[in-house]
């Protein structure tokens, strides 16, 4: 169902701070359906692979280290206009700029440790969903 899914990760900071429940509640209340979900931990190799698009950026090493520093929750979410609507729900990448009522405004602590990931395009939503989930893990 291209265009109707996005991939999220509840990042290690939000897991450590016990915000899994609060974030999932906001996701459900915003009308997203959970297609797939897992509690897992990325190795530094897998985190590097997931964020390979940022390889040349100065923050890449820090990002990979952080994303492999503890468990995450990965999920595929379904809704009409999922990518754009989820990015509205999570708010700006830097929580200092995130609007009131967004997940990052509520739960993120810094630009690097910003509580949640959301796909930035339909193409990446599909690639990122395939990164975390096989077909038989989707319902
Ligand atoms: P995310 O939406 O998961 O996609 C890439 C991530 O890189 C982003 O969230 C931030 O957590 C992180 N990021 C972006 N810019 C910076 C930065 N300047 N310093 C550290 N981390 C960053």
Image (cartoon, grey):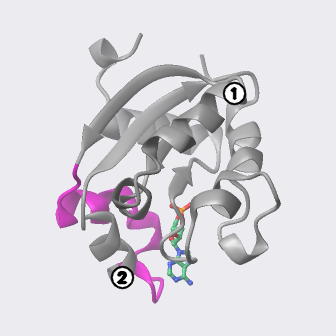
What element does badge 1 sit on? Answer: helix
| Quarter the C terminus occupies | top left
Across and down, in percent, residue 8 comes to 50, 43
Task: Say which mark, if any, is on residue 136.
Answer: none
* Viewer-side label of 2, 1: 1
Q: Give the residue number, with chain letter if any, for mark 2.
A: 62
Q: Can residue 7 be seen at all in this image of the molecule? A: no
Most foreground residue, 49 or 93: 93
Across and down, in percent, residue 98 comes to 76, 65
Whether the residue under disc 2 has CB within 8 Å of ligand 1: yes
Neighbours of disc 2 within 10 Å: few (<14), some (14-19), many (20+): few
Residue at 68% of width from left, 22% of height from top? 79
Magenta-drawn stretch contains 16? no
Q: Can residue 133 be seen at all in this image of the molecule? A: yes
Residue 126 relative to residue 88: left or right: left
Which quadrant would residue 27 be assigned to in this image? top right
Residue at 68% of width from left, 39% of height from top? 83
Image position of 138 with respect to 67: above or below: above
| Quarter the N terminus occupies | top right
> Mark 2 near mark 1, Cβ–Cβ under 8 Å?
no
What element does badge 2 sit on? Answer: helix
From which residue to which does the magenta span run?
A: 41-60
Q: Single out the residue that lies furthest toward the bottom.
A: 58
Across and down, in percent, residue 81 comes to 76, 29
Magenta-drawn stretch contains 46? yes
Which quadrant would residue 31 be assigned to in this image? top right
Q: Give the residue number, with chain letter if any, for mark 1.
A: 29
Residue 28 relative to residue 17: left or right: right
């Amino acid at each position: 169902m291209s265009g109707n899914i996005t991939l999220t990760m509840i990042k290690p900071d939000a897991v450590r701070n016990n915000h899994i429940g609060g974030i999932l509640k906001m996701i459900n209340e915003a009308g997203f359906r959970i297609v797939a979900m897992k509690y897992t931990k990325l190795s530094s190799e897998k985190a590097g692979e997931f964020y390979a698009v940022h390889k040349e950026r100065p923050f890449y090493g820090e990002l990979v280290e952080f994303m492999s520093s503890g468990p995450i929750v990965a999920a595929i979410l379904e809704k009409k206009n999922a990518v754009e609507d989820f990015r509205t729900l999570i708010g700006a990448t830097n929580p200092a700029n995130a609007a009131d009522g967004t997940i990052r405004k509520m739960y993120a602590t810094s630009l690097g440790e910003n509580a949640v990931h959301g796909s930035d395009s339909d193409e990446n939503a599909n690639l990122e969903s395939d990164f975390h989930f096989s077909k038989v893990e989707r319902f």
